[in-house]
Image (cartoon, rainbow, N blue to C red):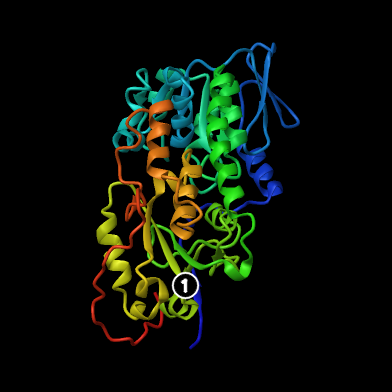
Amino acid sequence: MTSSYIPRGKCIFPHVIMMGSIILICLVCGCITDSEKSGDTVVGAGGNTSLTVTDSLGYTVDLTHPAERIVCQNSGSAEILASIGAGDRIIGLSNTTISQKNYLINKTPNAQNYGDTYTPNIERLITLKPDLFIAYSDSTIKPRNLDKILNNNMTVVYQTVYDIRNLHNETIFLGKISGHEVDADRLNAFNDKYLSLIKDRVKNISPADSPKIYSEQIVDYMAITNGSSGDYILNLVHARNVAGSIYQQNAVVSPEWVIDQNPDIIIRMVSSGNNMATIRNNLQNRQGFSRINAVKNQRIYCVSGTILSGPREVIGALYIAKAIYPDRFADIDPEAILHEYAQEFLPDSDTETAFYPSLSGVLQYPTITVAQKPTVLENSV
């Protein structure tokens, strides 16, 4: 059988971009502006500064005081700000964030709808008069009209938030720019505690004892590949990512390739609002998948992108760790920890199904019916 993959589309877990290219793009666009740029340092209006922070693209921003009027294109940044008690400083959110993340509403009482996530309404932004605009750091999802935002003298900073490797430092950043450093430290302590727990529980697992995992993004056959945050999580929990040798971040693999890899476990990321049971059933009924060990042993899991790509990514990693090694995490209930997060930091953020099937209590694999289909493989996706 011939293994193959076809690179195409946009990556759900953004790839690591060379810093030189990032700086070049930012210099061409005039990425951060308020008055005067000196090297990579931006001096706040008025010239006097008392607060210096560095964003996710390496730009240093000097502010005269903690930001009081913040617009968030980056919904992950908005969630962290709300979680550390700075939600009242957010005065602008996108229509998508407002409609899909209801749990932010009570924590962001001053937030108004600025329009489309990727093409903010400039007139609305001008009316809001933000002293800071937090954009996504990935070039593919930055505002398309970034030049207009900058031309209206708005200070723009960039964050990732959807990569677990940057989460700690980005939380510190948001604590500093909002004046909620103590609360940011408390959130980091929560995440660090469970991150350390994962590392401690899996530290003596050898590669030979690690199961093979096929992890799929929200697009069918778009694999979690080398260098992504999802790949890092699989390595963190000592699992073997079958797509870990693929360096193309936009890789869409073929059905034959997945079957040939014969993963022990399949993990599928699901976007908010979609039915996990239906997606899981469709996945395990794919043509030829009845031959895969993960399907034979009923080890197929769906995880919400909300907890696998954002501020709660550590909890997402904990769900995956328990699904892979139920014996090592028998005393850990990720769902209870998700509720703990909601109680401590962001009420009602735990109402959506995070993981399916549930890992709470005694871990049981549900009975699934595999449709009888021909085993003839498709040639491409």
Inspect this view and state whether residue 144 appears: no
Q: Above or below — where is 130 with respect to 324?
A: above
Left or right: residue 368 compared with residue 38: left
Residue 87 shows in this picture: yes
Q: Residue at x 58, y 68 (%)?
A: 209
Q: Quadrant of residue 220?
A: bottom left
Q: How many marks?
A: 1
Instruction: Please state the horizontal and vertical placement of residue 281, each as a whole percent of the image.
Output: 27, 65
Of residues 153 and 225, which is closer to you in this image?
225
Question: In terms of secondary structure, where does tag 1 sit?
Answer: loop
Query: Where residue 303 sits in the image (x, y, percent)?
Result: 38, 53
Three-letter code for the amino acid on which mark 1 is drawn: Pro
Quadrant containing the C terminus is bottom left
Asked if residue 250 is positioned above or below residue 18 in the image, the reply reads: below
Would residue 83 be found to the left or right of residue 271 on screen? right
Q: How far across and down, in percent of the image, does residue 267 sit?
A: 42, 61
Residue at point 51%, 54% (across, down): 328
Residue 213, compared with residue 29, is above or below; it is: below
Q: Residue at x 51, y 49 (%)?
A: 140
Q: Tag 1: Cα neighbours inside 10 Å, few (<14), some, or many (≥20)?
A: many
Kindly indicate the quadrant of the structure image that contains residue 334. top left
Q: Quadrant of residue 83?
A: top left
In front of the other: 83 or 293: 293
Q: Image check: 14 left or right of 57?
A: left
| Residue that numbered label 1 is attached to | 263
Residue 103 x %, y %: 33, 31
- What residue sits 42% from the left and 65% below the top? 266
